[in-house]
Amino acid sequence: MNSTDWKSLFAGFAAFCAVSLHLSAQPSNDMFASSAQVVGTNITYYGTVAGATSEPGEPPAPATDTVWISWAAPCTGRANYFPPRQHYINVYTGTTLALLQPVTLNEDDSICCCSFLAVEGVVYNFQVSGADSDFELDLWISPYDQAVNDDFAEATPVRGINRTYFGPLSVLGATMEPGEPAHWDGIPEKSIWWIWQAPEYGTMTLESSQSLASNVMIAVYTGDAVGTLTLVAKGTNAFTFSAIAGQNYHIAGAVPTNAVGDILITGYLFADTSCHPIPGNLLREPSWEGTGILDAQYWQWSGPLGGNVGAYYGDCDGSTWPVLYSGASIWQGFSTIPGHTYAVRFAYEYAGSGADGLVQVLWDTNLIGVADLAMANGGCWTWPSFTATASNTTSQVTFLNMGDAVAMDDFSVVDQTAPPAIVTQPSSQSTESGGTAAFFVNARGSLPLDYQWFFQSNALSGETNLSLTLTNASTNETGDYFVTISNNFGDVTSAVVSLRVDAPSYPTIVLQPYGDTVAQGGYFYVGIAALGTRPLSYQWIFNGDPIGGATNPSLTFTNVQPTNGGVYQVVVTNGAGTVLSLPATLNVSQSGQSGGLVLFANQAPYGQTNASAPVFDLDGVTPLNGGCVAQLYAGPTLPALRAVGVPVPFETGFNAGYYANSVVTLPSISAGSNAIVQVRAWDPAAGATYEQARALGGKFGESELLQIAAGGGVARPAALAGLQSFSMQAGLPEFNIGVIDFLNKLPDGGTVWSLIGQSNSIYLVEEAGQDWIWKPYLVLTNTAGTVNFTNAINTNSSANFFRARILD
């Protein structure tokens, strides 16, 4: 090797050593005291953690290779930064390691951004650690200006459906204006406002965890002026409310008067796309449901018309809606009252590709308004409204599209000068002591409609909705109820209905046991529900002999064997007497188990063909928000309909109205065979089963019956195709208890009795002697409301007593 070669090799080695020394050296900002200083409102900092260490007394970090960056906030505002990839950042205030205090950080996973409240002049220390060596820190601050939406009239408009952001907006300089309702109770406060029009029906969840102001109260109102607002819902952190499509909601964010920062509310609307009829709507086929677009019976049209039929998503009311292309028009005629003013409303959504939507609305031949939908506002249903005064007894409304394509839905024409009229009267109810009863009325007329419920002619305080729900009912609430409905043009009073609360002292079985035929190895549940003065004691009997230890209201067999076949009865006793149930026969089949499968779901999974069908509470509007359970009932025939699977809970918040999905095996139906199925729901606080909750006056509800082909084998589990939403109910038929009257005595000493009760119902008549042991006497069908029966002479008793009750 010559001298030149040695020189080259030495030079290369020296360069390698220099690079190695540079890579292994500690970063200059490894220690807190030598933190890198950054300045400004919009900063990009490049750094490295290669060779960094963790010094004694330093706050713990996910990794030990920590470096420090310090920044003095140049103003007060929302500070934001993107966390460097595969690095971790903690933020502190304080001048030494011993004085460091962590800063509360908000993380938005949707954009991978972190935010915190930065105060002018305060120094913020960023502790960076991670797996990679080099990193980039992007930091910027949005200074707080004076609140731009302080007053109700200055409410910031917001559009959106899936994830909608209200803010962030500053609370600097915010106040409470005269007449504004108190959002916090007893706390000096200030507020800012937004306005949001619900694009669809559904459950809206609002949450404020991303706000940088502390102690945020969110309040939702309806109304057109600050002094006439009606509270819909309010809460801190997060809550839900039922949104009505087209309704304008005013949303206040309130904080204590000394609060600094901003309010950022995130809204999630879980849409309910089932049909929502509008009271008093004069238009037929208002949402085009049940018909193809070109098969509409009442609508007429000209020009290019398209649309969607039976779609699984995207609609605001049902699953069908027309699309009007440029030059298309649709119209419909209806009866009107000359001189009356009518409100015309509809929903529309941009469906074009290059220009704004422009829909002219005509009343007869007169233009009453133009709905201008900007191309930039696509992706969300909008609900314009117009008014017109009728000149004739028959009028026509026309919608003519002069712009790009628009989807349209949920058309309505409602008389604004009509007094209230009752469409559906409330009905009489009965329930058990401690149960629930609910009265409903459906009315039409010019809005707003005001409701007031009465009990025994006395107004019930706070009962000003279209429904009246009585929970934990007592005998003091037995009596007559009615409701008055009023608006600016008149008032109407409903029919007077009654509530009877049943609270017997003697033992009474309100749900009789029933038998079944079950395959060997299958599941069998037999149970009752009973009332009477507590305590009640139970004793089950099998083929005439008491069953040891069987002293509960129910029996459960998880692995039925032939030896379990037979007749079951139960005796219920308290201090007032005894009652014996009807017999229930269990037959054990040797045919073995089947195995058809059903997807038990009322919320369609992606790619499935079953429609979403949320379950609503007693008011028919609010989705069930937890508390209740649902169970599938199935059988090869209607008489064989039985509970299968296990009860599953309803979800809360964003998924209110829907129960947890599960796959259920049908024990009596093989894959590919037809099955009758039904969804049943109830409040488990009222009973362990649907039947118990119903018999004891709790909340319950059921879907329409469906016929499906069971899945399984090579097929996926069958969906509940055709499932529709339903509402819970409470209370029992008014004549749950039959009235028995003596008619006459027969020549042979027998007696004739009449039973007065609910028509087309099956009653169990029970008999007791002076020992007050009630036993089943006969089961009879009361077809006409009154039915007679004969009691033969009884030589073993000097007196006979009868009572009757509808068989559940």
Image (cartoon, rainbow, N blue to C red):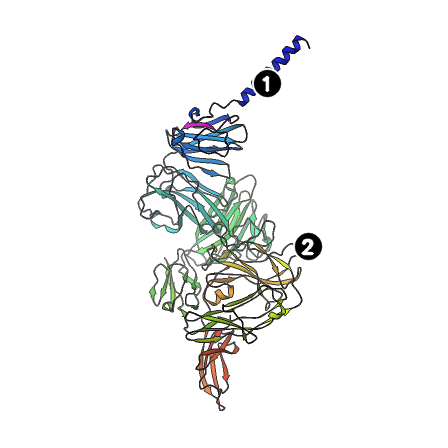
Q: CA distance from mark 2 to mark 1?
A: 66 Å
Q: Is residue 677 visible?
A: yes
Name the mark on residue 396: none
Boundaries of the magenta span: 48-75
Quarter placement of the N terminus? top right
Q: Which x, y percent locates residue 630? A: 52, 59
Mark 2 or mark 1, whichever is nearer to me: 1
Q: Is residue 51 magenta?
A: yes
Q: Which x, y percent locates residue 389? A: 43, 53
Name the mark on residue 16: 1
Circle 2 residues within 10 Å: few <14, some 14–19, many ≥20: few
Mark 2–mark 1 CB contact (< 8 Å): no
Position of 573 compared to 305: left or right? left
Q: Is residue 197 visible?
A: no
Q: Which x, y percent locates residue 597? A: 63, 58
Circle 1 residues within 10 Å: few <14, some 14–19, many ≥20: few
SS of the residue under disc 2: loop
Q: Is residue 473 magenta?
A: no
Q: Nearer the viewer, residue 665 or 340?
A: 665
SS of the residue under disc 1: helix
* Of the image marks 2 and 1, the number of the one nearer the N terminus: 1
Q: Mostly what secondary structure, the magenta segment?
A: loop
Amino acid at circle 1: Phe
Residue 71 falls in which quadrant of the image? Answer: top left
Is 660 above or below relative to 3? below
Is 276 above or below relative to 457? above
Residue 707 falls in which quadrant of the image? Answer: bottom right
Residue underneath mark 2: 714
> Which residue ends up furthest to the bottom in the rendered image?
747
Q: Which x, y percent locates residue 295? A: 60, 55
Amino acid at circle 2: Val
